[in-house]
Image: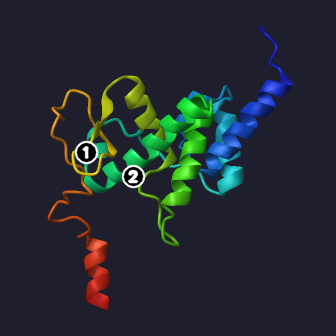
């Protein structure tokens, strides 16, 4: 049996702590560290005070294509690509740095969750790596937006330039306007 380096274990623990603070799910922690599930559970409970959420990770590319998630996903993936191409960031560190920059630009309201979670951002990068998703340039604003890889996008118009008629009309927004 190979002995495990204390330094490498310490790095994994610090990485897990940083990921948990950013909102990572247990499955993401298991994929990105070599720590056991039991240690990750203990670490998660110690940091958050509760057990990690249960359930499957997002597995569909469709979520990233819908109006609001597409805008947030597009912002994140462009930040991520810039860090990889120009700052030499790689792997999970590139995802974490890009996510932190995304959060600086898209701060959720107090008590609200960000539209794009760290787990979804990590999944988005995996979809790009497997060539299930790509970006298309908007014909109006010239921005790069997330699309399906095999979608015809020569005349693509983004959700900011051509907002859907129901954009922003969520139940919460309707409830807020009724209360006012």
Residue at the limit of the structure toward the right, as seen here:
6
How has the structure been colored for display?
Answer: rainbow
- To which residue does mark 2 refer? 72
Q: Which residue is drawn at 41% across and 39% down?
A: 56
Q: Residue at x 29, y 76 (%)?
A: 173
Element at label 2: helix
Nearer the observer, disc 2 or disc 1?
Answer: 1
Image coordinates for residue 87, horizontal then vertical, percent: 62, 34
Q: Distance between the residues labelled 2 and 1?
A: 15 Å
Of the 4 image quadrants, the one containing the C terminus is bottom left
Residue 167, visible in the rendered structure: yes
Element at label 1: loop
| Left or right relative to 116: residue 95 | right
Residue at the limit of the structure toward the top, as seen here:
1
Q: Which residue is drawn at 65% across and 47% down?
A: 44
Image coordinates for residue 85, horizontal then vertical, percent: 53, 30
- To which residue does mark 1 refer? 138
Q: Please report contact status of discs 2 and 1: CB closer than 8 Å, yes or no.
A: no
Q: Residues within 10 Å of mark 2 (few under 14, many from 20)?
A: many
| Left or right relative to 171: residue 43 | right
Of the 4 image quadrants, the one containing the N terminus is top right
Q: Residues within 10 Å of mark 1 (few under 14, many from 20)?
A: some
| Left or right relative to 89: residue 153 | left
Determine the image quadrant of residue 86: top right
Q: Which residue is drawn at 21% across and 45% down?
A: 139
Image coordinates for residue 114, horizontal then vertical, percent: 46, 59
The correct choice, above or below, for 159 with respect to 24 in the image is: below
Q: Answer with mark 2 or mark 1, whichever residue precedes in sequence.
A: 2
């Amino acid at each position: 049996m190979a002995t495990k380096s204390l330094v490498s274990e310490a790095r994994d623990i610090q990485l897990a702590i940083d990921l948990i603070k950013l909102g990572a799910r247990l499955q993401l922690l298991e994929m990105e560290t070599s720590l056991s599930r039991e240690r990750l559970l203990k670490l998660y409970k110690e940091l958050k005070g509760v057990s990690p959420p249960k359930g499957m990770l997002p597995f569909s590319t469709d979520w990233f294509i819908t109006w609001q998630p597409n805008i947030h996903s597009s912002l994140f993936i462009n930040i991520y690509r810039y860090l990889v191409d120009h700052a030499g960031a790689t792997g999970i560190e590139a995802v974490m740095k890009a996510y932190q920059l995304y959060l600086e630009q898209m701060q959720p309201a107090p008590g609200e969750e960000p539209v794009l979670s760290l787990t979804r951002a990590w999944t988005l990068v995996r979809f790009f790596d497997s060539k299930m998703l790509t970006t298309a340039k908007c014909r109006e604003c010239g921005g790069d937006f997330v699309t399906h890889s095999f979608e015809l996008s020569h005349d693509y118009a983004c959700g900011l330039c051509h907002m859907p008629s129901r954009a922003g009309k969520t139940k919460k927004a309707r409830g807020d306007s009724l209360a006012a």
